[in-house]
Image: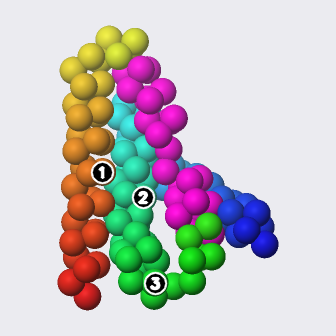
Amino acid sequence: MHWFSVALGGAIGAVGRYAVSVWLLPTSQYKFPYATISVNVLGSLIMGILYVIILERADLPVETRNLLMVGFLGAFTTFSTFSLDAISLWQNGDQFLALVYVVSTVALCLLAIIAAIWLTRLF
């Protein structure tokens, strides 16, 4: 059952990731990876919320962790895509934009998970 939960969550996460890419494609026009940074920040926010709800409070069954945290967020967030986007920007001569992208992604994801944990603990 654990394998099925991870697989189901992964399928939903992959479709969600693709949906964000399609939705944000007109915005980026392949110039800046808005979709990748968006899913990574949103994924960090959701991970922080689930961390408190599932692991600290035990308000959801531990089995839900496999579905949401391992499966869904594992497929939804895209660190490998993030890395490729950063290298592509750098190799295309956009070193400054590559650095902005790397620093902003890491900073925003850390802030998202910190904020999510803090806010979820309040409620």
Q: Position of residue 98 (x, y in %)?
A: 30, 25
Asked if residue 60 lies in the magenta stretch, the reply is no
For badge 2, the amino acid type reads Gly
* Colour scheme in use: rainbow
Q: Which mark is residue 109?
A: 1
Category of crowding for the residue at label 2, using alpha-carbon neighbours closer than 10 angstroms: few (below 14), some (14–19), many (at least 20): many
Q: Earlier in the sequence, mark 2 or mark 1?
A: 2
Residue 56 sits above or below residue 92 on the image: below
* Figure quadrant of the N terminus: bottom right
For badge 1, the amino acid type reads Cys
* Figure quadrant of the C terminus: bottom left
The residue located at (45%, 88%) in the rendering is 59
Q: Which residue is mark 2?
A: 43
Q: Are marks 2 and 1 in contact (CB under 8 Å)?
A: yes
Image: magenta residue range: 67-89
**What main secondary structure does the magenta stretch of the protein show?**
helix
Q: Which residue is mark 3?
A: 58
The residue located at (24%, 61%) in the rendering is 114
For the residues carrying marks 1 and 3, which lies nearer the camera in this image? 3
Residue 5 image-quadrant placement: bottom right
Residue 35 sits above or below residue 120 on the image: above
Measured in 3D between alpha carbons, the distance from the residue under mark 2 to the one under mark 3, in whole angstroms, is 20 Å
Residue 120 image-quadrant placement: bottom left
Q: Relative to 42, is 60 on the left or the right?
A: right
